[in-house]
Image (tube, rainbow, N blue to C red):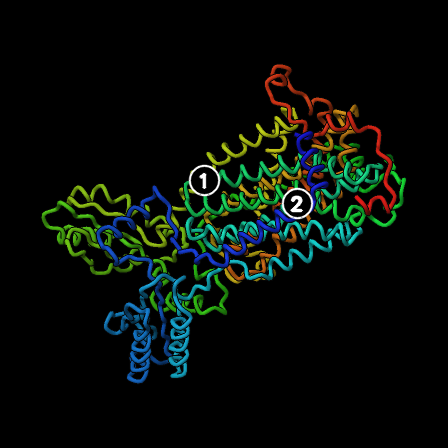
Amino acid sequence: MATFLYRVGRLAFRRRWYVALVWAAVLAAVGLGALKAPGAADEGFSMPGIESQKAFDLMEQRFPGATADGATARVVFVAPNGQKVTAADHRKAVEDTVADLADGSQVASAVNPFQAKAVSKDGTTAYATVTYKVAADDLTDASKEQLEHALEEARDTGLTVDAGGSAMADGGGAGGSAELIGVAIAAVVLLVTFGSLAAAGLPLLTALIGVGVSMATILVLSDALGLSTTTGTLAMMLGLAVGIDYALFVVSRYREERANGRAPQEATALAVGTAGSAVVFAGLTVVIALAGLAVVGIPMLTKMGLAAAGAVVVAVLIALTLVPAFLGFWPNAVLRRRDRRPGRTEEEAKDNGGTRWARFVLRRPLPVLILGVVGLGALALPMTSLQLGMPGDEAKPTSTTERRAYDALAEGFGPGFNGPLTVVVDAQGDDDAQAAAAAISKDIGATKGIVSVSPARFNEAGDTAVFSVVPSTAPTDEKTKDLVTAIRGERPGIESETGATYEVTGTTALNIDISEKVQSALVPYLIVVVGLAIVLLLVVFRSLLVPLKAALGFLLSVLASLGAVVVVFQEGHGAGLLGVETTGPIMSLMPIFLVGIVFGLAMDYEVFLLSRMREAYVHGETSHQAVTSGFRHSARVVVAAALIMIAVFAGFIGESDSMIKMIGFGLASAVLLDAFVVRMAIVPAVLALLGDKAWWLPKWLDRILPRVDVEGEALTRGADTPEPAPTDQEAARV
């Protein structure tokens, strides 16, 4: 591996113009394709194999066209204090608004609340449901403006008017500020780390090129693959973070080789052969973790994982080809001024912060290990009270009309009104479908916790009925989950009495089913991903204990970061500082999502840090000396890489979308804990306690495993004598 990458780096340096032109052509091609590509059609959220999805599919089959993914808006009217919407003037204002809403070219129907009996018992609140002919993503600006105009005119009459529903969605995704914040902080970190504008700018430039290629490719493929804005956000988030980190690793090793007296071309080739090997295997672990999301069985999550994995692959390829090409263009610009003087070599014995920290840990490994494990364990404790759900309008800021509409409906009609259950009765083959549906409706309505049951609506064939059930508790309440379980538990008895079957669906039931499926998939996912990564690390480091230690350390950091997410987003401690106005259940996909991404990112630091230790150990240093050497060369770079990732992820906390905000916080906290507690403290402490045993591998296994030479032993054997450093004039001609 190291020899092959050495040749790649050398070739990229020598043929730098060709490499740069190839990447420019790729960027231009996918960029033009993205401009011409149609927007991705929103396929909606689906999860095969759960009851809610089966019920929805049955409705699609038996009620063709009726359950299409048309956008909806629920407009809520609230009378001023002491008044009622049923008063003549308020009633006229509501009816006029509904009539205005029905005039839209994309509107299928707008239901008058007084005809649909959609008025609260106390007469203070009413709502009108507007259904559109097209999906939310296909609504024109004219349709949205008409809706906003109708709401404003209704407010002018003295009513409080707000609206929720899919028609109010703004498309989500990152708006650009998050990326800019992350890039700005990354630039500062790189400048402090390298002390050179060129060295700081090169990783940023190559990372942005990689993100451009990845995002444009996603747009080109979005129509064919049904990729969403959230998919693009994840790919951008990870592509930017790993793109900067991987280039940082290569540039840092290049500067080290130049300081050791290597010529620019040789230094570039050695940097790609050694640090590039670590980049390849670090990237491979990220790809394994992201592609492994397919194990969960959620199409949307699979697409997100594969798209992000593609962005990581692009980042790896750029680090191995475009970065050495740019080093060929500016061989001296990335060096500090004092390092550009001919003949200057690095003082190997020179201490830095990394060596001092390593020696501190090596002197007292047990206290450091205990403190790190206990600290992470304490942070992980809140995870025991983790509640999963899918945040809806209730999680949005009170400044949004969707949130105000949600609160108004809950106050006027009860907390369960925002999360009705949909029951689909399949009476195909039953002699009296209407009687069967009526019996099922009556039995379900008698269940404790049910407020009301709507009249059943039949399809044209008369063999399928649909009715809504309103719980007494909010959609995210644990009692609602128990109610859904109870209704489904009554099914065998009811089916035996009526001869018809039924299934429960709706947004609330769907969220409950998603949570259960995700929880059941978490263990298989961990086994697949962690197992494959352990095998990979076993090949890279040729050790049994190092991969196991890496996996256990990762689990500690993930559990601790999940605990931090629970503390902020569920329990509300410090939520105001992050702009979280409403707390509640954690997004159902968050645990498995965090596990997949953070595992890959954690292995970045593990591979880069341990590869330098392994390199020193293979070249004859003792286990303790190898730890110190690894920290001397890698600690500063790993710290900088972690700070950059934290900055990139933390930038997304400022987004209004609660899902992206939670993901950004979870990833930032996970990287913080994994890099600074696990990799920089627990790892050296464990290695100090294990000594030479850390690098032990049974001889029979050593013979079986392929040799990848990630430490570059083959390269250093032939490069022990440094080439004379060129003069400035010679370097300029290279």
Amino acid identity at mark 2: Tyr
Q: Which mark is residue 294?
A: 1
Residue at screen point 75% across, 34% down? 630
Return the residue at label 2: 18
Amino acid identity at mark 1: Ala
Name the quarter where the N terminus is drawn: top right
Residue at screen point 38% across, 83% down? 157
Residue 665: in sight, yes or no?
A: no
Q: Is residue 640 left or right of residue 130?
A: right
Label 1 to label 2: alpha-carbon separation: 37 Å
Q: Is residue 462 left or right of residue 103?
A: left
Residue at screen point 60% across, 33% down? 552
Mark 2 residue element: helix
Mark 1 or 2 closer to N-term?
2
Residue nearer the viewer, 233 or 593: 233
Quadrant of the rendered image containing residue 595: top right
Residue nearer the viewer, 197 or 598: 197
| Label 1 environment density (alpha carbons within 10 Å; few <14, some 14–19, many ≥20) | some
The relative height of residue 664 versus residue 702 in the rendered view (above or below) is below
- Spot occupied by residue 68 in the image (x, y as percentages of width and height): 30, 57
Residue nearer the viewer, 531 or 370: 531
Name the quarter where the C terminus is drawn: top right
- Spot occupied by residue 431 in the image (x, y as percentages of width and height): 9, 47
